[in-house]
Amino acid sequence: MINRRLLPAIENSLAKFPAVALLGPRQAGKTTLARIVAHERPGSLYLDLERPSDLVKLADPELFLSRHTGQLIVLDEVQRKPELFAVLRALVDEKRVSGRFLLLGSASPQLLRQASESLAGRISFHELAPFDVSEIKPSHSELQNLWLRGGFPLSWLAKSDTDSYAWRESFIATHLERDIPSFGIRIPGATLHRFWQMLAHLHGQLWNASRLAAGFGVSAPTVQHYLDILEATYMLRRLPPLQANLGKRLVKSPKVYLRDSGILHALLGITSLNDLAGHPVVGASWEGWVLEQIAQLIGAQWQLSFYRTASGAEIDIVAERGKRKIGFEIKFSSAPSLAKGFWLAMNDLKLDQAYIVAPVQSRYPLATNVEVVPAVELANVLERI
């Protein structure tokens, strides 16, 4: 069993809120984590809304759920029965005690509007992503395998790279053919698959809806809709540009990344580290993988963006919290060097600290307030900022 970093936060929220939502992509480990939480609470009730026998029990949800007021009720794949949210609100308001419902879902709160609206003020949301470096704790030699396979538990724990790749191909097909239609989204799976593959080739680049729409043969609003779907189902991350009044001409389009590196590699047909090393996407893939680790580990109180100006100043990630600004430059090199644009960005933004994240074996200073850190140490670095 690999301990999940989110477990203490879930326990803490259940002690404070009547309902807690654990959201994230399918197969990220939500059910396993929920069963661990339920095991610590004798008498907990677990209902899988994809199982017909459990759905039958909820034919009259108010009657059934009101019989289990003193128990933690876990509702898995809650997006399958959206009308439940109004019932849950009524039950919570009738008897407002903490830790009544743990809701598991495979869509963002924006897609689950019923939850965010019906249970506003009564629910705490948490996102469970695939494994990160703080949970796997890879050695320097294991790190590249984690990058190749991605963090989905069944991909990472597969017996071989071939088995891992086969699992990811199956995951992609299932997501397109079953998961997305389950949200009432009626777009042919082949169309979304082709769009997803196009995004894989554009991984880490600036989003240009008009250019992509022209290549795809549809309108710009249509490709924007496709992008929103993949983002809402945790397959994609948009990194916004920094919004700042610096008297500079700033890039205004977001960057787009596939969130899991293993899924990215499967969409591109990359089956091994040798394939990855010789692929044109290798640098962008590494950048996206490091971005996802930082996004998961740094905490929701930090706002992430990138900085790029027309004059060439650039830094991959700017993390802001209040008046603090920390920069992250990502390099796929055992001896990273920095271009002029990085130093211009340091001067423009007056960063408190900058880290160069690279596949090196030990950390070392590069300049005042600039340090090279190994990717395997990201969790330790981010704990201290």
Image (spheres, grey):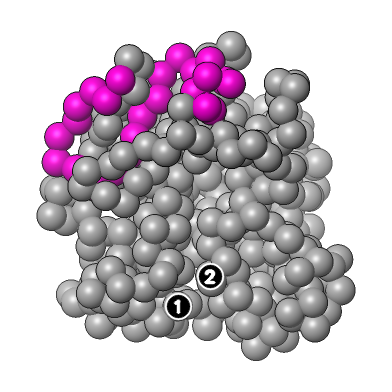
Query: Residue beneath label 2, please?
Result: 200
**Residue 11 visible to an observer of this rendering:** no
Residue 268, labelled with which disc?
1
Amino acid on which the number 2 mark rests in the picture = Ala
Residue 219: percent from the left, percent from the top?
Answer: 86, 74
Neighbour tally class for label 1: few under 14, some 14-19, many 20 plus, Cα within 10 Å? some
Q: Residue at x 52, y 19 (%)?
A: 347
| 193 displayed left or right of 266 | right
Q: Earlier in the sequence, mark 1 or mark 2?
A: 2
Residue 17 magenta-drawn? no
Q: Which residues are magenta?
A: 344-367
> Residue 296 versus residue 211: which sits nearer the camera?
211
> Residue 209 versus residue 152: which sits nearer the camera?
209
Q: Is residue 267 above or below residue 126?
A: below
Amino acid on which the number 1 mark rests in the picture = Leu
Q: Residue at x 65, y 88 (%)?
A: 190
Q: Residue at x 39, y 58 (%)?
A: 283
Marks 1 and 2: CB-CB under 8 Å? yes
Neighbour tally class for label 2: few under 14, some 14-19, many 20 plus, Cα within 10 Å? many
| 57 displayed left or right of 266 | right
**Residue 369 visible to an observer of this rendering:** yes
Residue 135, labelled with which disc?
none
Residue 171: percent from the left, percent from the top?
Answer: 46, 76
